[in-house]
Image (cartoon, grey):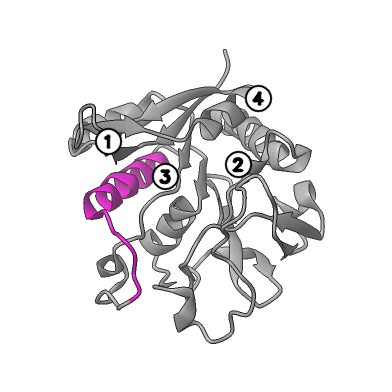
Amino acid sequence: MKPIIGISGSILINKGNTFSGYRRSYVNQDYVESVLRAGGIPFIIPFNEDLESTREMVEQVDGIILSGGHDVDPYNYGEDPMLKIGEVFPKRDVFDMELYKTAIKLKKPIFGICRGYQIINVINGGTLYQDLSYADFVKIKHDQVDNPTQATHFVELEEGTFLKNILGKEYKVNSFHHQIIKDVAPEFKVVAKSSDGVVESIEKITEDSFIIGVQWHPEMLSLNCEKSQEIFNSFVRKVIEYKK
């Protein structure tokens, strides 16, 4: 049986004329398609406030993808909101963190993307810069406005890491974020950095846990980029391995 990959969902509020203001559960379709191409069965875990039900949903899947979305509430890493923070969704923070904690308890692999990557860092004791402008070392454009399927800057990958074996020493990524990691969570290894020193990926891989996170959006590149798709392929293979 193919492994079931849970993808964290969010809420989209319809702003059109029909059902204006109506709340819809959703994830972007490219997460679903990336998992399907990798040989997994995508299972959207809808945002909800019933933590017991959330835990039960995690029990039904074999691995978790924490998807992108709102800024992480700085309360979670001990800071007040600063002037340039974007929109936060504190209830989704609680939801995503419950997904993470349950998956860890059940020893299920986790892959965090963009916001999901930042959630992994924060829940494990790391911190964030609330806006790129607060980090004086940032020199390149990380808040991309081009087509999301277009890669715009390079990252350099560390030897001996999971993604280095897939992407090689240097890899070009897309970039849709205005926040970055400040302090890397204890016990996590830096996997990739951009040329200006922004931490673009972290991992924690042990006998009992497989956790990787990336700041970019490989699911938006995967249709036309073999290496981006291979990230999902390799994650699904790891899910099968840890399932055994």
Is 74 left or right of 104, judged from the image as shown? left
Please state which amino acid type lies under the numbered disc 3.
Ile
> Mark 3 or mark 2: which comes first in sequence?
3
| Front: mark 4 or 1 | 1
Q: Residue at x 78, y 62 (%)?
A: 159
| Front: mark 3 or 4 | 4
Q: Which residue is mark 3?
A: 104
Magenta segment, which residues?
84-105
Question: Crowdedness of circle 2 by 10 Å Cα count: few (<14), some, many (20+)?
Answer: many
Q: CA distance from mark 3 to mark 2?
A: 26 Å
> Mark 4 or mark 1: which comes first in sequence?
1
Tags 1 and 2 touching, CB below 8 Å? no
> How many discs mark residues in the rendered view?
4
Q: Is residue 85 magenta?
A: yes
Q: Which mark is residue 74?
A: none
**Residue 33 appearing in the image:** yes
Please state which amino acid type lies under the numbered disc 1.
Asn
Q: Quadrant of residue 86?
A: bottom left
Q: CA distance from mark 1 to mark 2?
A: 23 Å
> Toward the viewer: 101 or 130?
130
Q: Secondary structure at mark 1?
A: loop
> Mark 3 or mark 1: which comes first in sequence?
1
| Front: mark 1 or 2 | 1
| Rendering coords of residue 27 (x, y %) | 42, 34
Q: Which residue is mark 2?
A: 220
| Rendering coords of residue 141 (x, y %) | 61, 70
Q: Quadrant of residue 191?
A: bottom right
Q: CA distance from mark 3 to mark 1?
A: 34 Å
| Front: mark 3 or 1 | 1
Q: CA distance from mark 4 to mark 2?
A: 13 Å
